[in-house]
Image (cartoon, grey):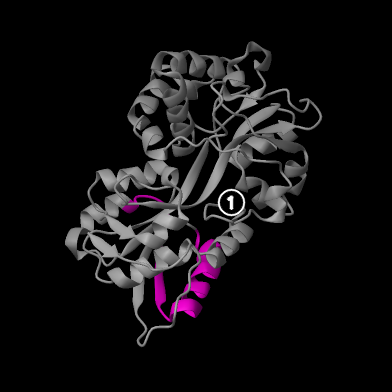
Amino acid sequence: MLRTAVLATTALTIATPAFAGEVNVYSYRQPELIQPLIDGFQDATGHTANVVYIDKGITERLVAEGARSPADMIFTVDIARLSEAKDAGVLQTVESDLLTANIPDAMRDDDNQWFGVTTRARIVYASKDRVAEGEITTYEDLADPKWKGRICTRSGTHDYTIGLVSAVIEHNGLEATKTWLEGVKANLAKAPEGNDRAQVKSIWAGECDISLGNTYYMGAMLADPEQTEWANSVRIEFPTFADGAGTHVNVSGVAMVKGASNEAEALAFMEYLSSPEAQTIYANVVNEYPVAPGSKPSDLVASWGELTPDATDLTAIASHRAEALKLVEQVDFDSGS
């Protein structure tokens, strides 16, 4: 277990060290998204971050490599992937006063083995032409028969869907969630396929009226000339849970690999990512929500509306992953309505 004491406020001040080190990172995040953070880290610390992009199977690779792994830390998305790595025993506990100060309790592991550095909301994309503002207010509304034949979504077995179903279980219980999932399935316009942006394209094409998706995809679509028209055909609605909890959010996060050769440099990168500088860069580049106190979303993200996130501990939600997958398979969700 790595321990460090930081005698500082939530602001991060890093002096350039007497020697420059390096940190080896396995990243699920695309290189172009994190390059500004790598550059900022190197400018602030003098350390070099060597990033290996892995689009799937980070945990499996770490397990296979064992003590021979060159990785010092991982940078990935979704509570499911972070929890999977922890459960596989490839991470180590990190005690950092700075990370504790900058990252809310609900956004980090109970054992400090992973830390969320940004959040993204699982929202509803709604047709501007066919869905009135405020017509859908809760996730439970998705099972209302009024939406029959009007919903598009990606596969029920995808991590993003499993995350939402896990949250519904946490709030409503297993049986109620099964009933809800059956209701959502009955309302599908077609069998789930494609990614979140493909669902918005389907709304634009008139194949459905609402879809589930992550917030940052709106920014991605607006930045792509071929997809701008899709984005402009919808607006973002922030559903909440019927019990009063806010909108379901997930994280992009970091963790230190067990047996890391460059622990000090890995910790420095993790702490840098929680700093106001990095949080601002991240918010503007990837259109996600920063987590550090006082940090604000980009103007574009703020223009989509006010997010009131569900404050439920993500580890509690992640504990329902196996149950969520079982429910998705039981109701045969991916076969469509």
- Residue under the image location 35 percent in, 76 percent down: 22
Depth order, front residue of 202/145: 145
Q: Residue furthest right?
A: 129
- Residue under the image location 61 percent in, 60 percent down: 285
Image coordinates of residue 188 in percent, x first then y, are 60, 21
Q: Is residue 147 magenta?
A: no
Q: Residue furthest left?
A: 67
Q: Establish if 328 lies above or below 36.
A: above
- Residue under the image location 45 percent in, 14 percent down: 176
Q: Is residue 261 left or right of residue 193?
A: left
| Segment colored magenta | 30-58
Q: Establish if 228 lies above or below 150.
A: below
Q: Which residue is mark 1?
A: 288
Depth order, front residue of 174/184: 174
Quadrant of the image containing the C terminus: top right
Which quadrant holds residue 170? Answer: top left
Q: Is residue 65 left or right of residue 29?
A: left
Q: Hey, what amino acid is under mark 1?
A: Glu
Q: Residues within 10 Å of mark 1 (few under 14, many from 20)?
A: many
Image coordinates of residue 72 in percent, x first then y, are 30, 65
Residue 54 seen in the figure: no
Which quadrant holds residue 20? Answer: bottom left
Q: Is residue 40 magenta?
A: yes
- Residue under the image location 67 percent in, 56 percent down: 298
Q: Establish if 231 lies above or below 337.
A: below
Q: Is residue 32 left or right of residue 171?
A: right
Quadrant of the image containing the N terminus: bottom left
Image coordinates of residue 83 in percent, x first then y, are 33, 43
